[in-house]
Image (cartoon, rainbow, N blue to C red):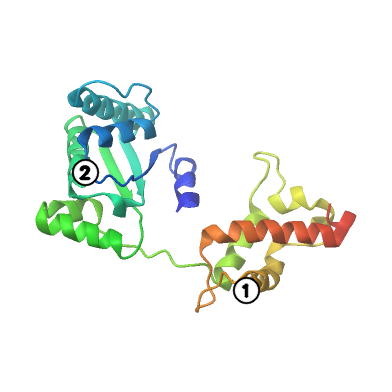
Amino acid sequence: MRLVFDRLPRDLDNLACIHIIAQTNRVPSVRAFFKELLTALGHACRTGETSDLRDRVRRRLEEVALSTGNSVAVLWIDEAQAWTGEEFLFLRDVQNALREVGSELVVFLSGEKPYLYRSIQDVSTNRSRAIKRRFASTRVHLRGYGKREVSDLFEQIDRVVWPEASGITWTQFFLPKAFEAGFRLKSETDACMAALLRENVLDADKRCQPWLIRDVLARFCRSRRQRCGEACR
């Protein structure tokens, strides 16, 4: 999710994207809610009355949305299962305020299964049915990476330009001699999957959570360089 979110501004004309990690609050507080949003928005002033905090959030979101010329801001809320009905209602109010000035707040929720779904169901049943339609209209299950996904990932790494605008690829930059000799990271898919298996990070379907692959891939690349010596450098 992080990789996709980080690419949105590059792929969609500098789309305004904000990320917040939901905090567990035993007693939901409107002030804490708006302070957390102000922090995510990079706003330095988080003092004052509740109405002041609310206005700062609305104005800042409007500024962020308008800065890209499309009047749209994307908010990704991670660990959203930590939120209660009150906090989703606070978010609804923020979205309504932006719509009044001609801007739109698009919300993505991610969280732990099945607790996020239960949280949405609870607020939809007991507080507002509109919450589910607004913020959870589509459910997407992010599966782990299997052999095909790892192969596709490595192929993309072989193609991506690094450093930016250099005209050379990531693999070519880090392993220039091996690249010239025909080495491609994609060809090492089987070896990497074997490494994942040795690390005991594959599930019953032989899949691995994407965030775990980064560390295994880093160790794999270091090992490859050490085995190849100067030929890979």
**Which residue sits at x=72%, y=46%?**
168
Q: CA distance from mark 1 to mark 2?
A: 43 Å
The image shows residue 185, relative to residue 1, as above or below, that is: below
Q: Secondary structure at mark 2?
A: loop
Q: Percent position (x, y) of residue 150?
A: 59, 66
- Report whether 29 appears left or right of 111: left
- Report whether 3 appears left or right of 233: left
- Report whether 7 appears left or right of 219: left
**Which residue sits at x=10%, y=56%?**
126
Which label sits on residue 197? 1
- Amino acid beneath label 1: Leu
Q: Considering depth in this image, is 169 or 206 the residue closer to the camera?
A: 206
The image shows residue 105, relative to residue 56, as above or below, that is: below
- Amino acid beneath label 2: Val
- Report whether 205 appears left or right of 167: left
Residue count near mark 1 (Cα–Cα under 10 Å), binned few <14, some 14–19, many ≥20: some
**Which residue sits at x=35%, y=56%?**
111
Which label sits on residue 144? none
Q: Percent position (x, y) of residue 58?
A: 25, 29
The image shows residue 25, relative to residue 115, as above or below, that is: above
Q: Which residue in the structure is indicated by mark 2?
A: 27
Q: Secondary structure at mark 1?
A: helix
Q: Percent position (x, y) of residue 115?
A: 29, 61
Residue count near mark 2 (Cα–Cα under 10 Å), binned few <14, some 14–19, many ≥20: few
Number of numbered labels in the structure image: 2
Among the 4 quarters of the image, the one containing residue 60: top left
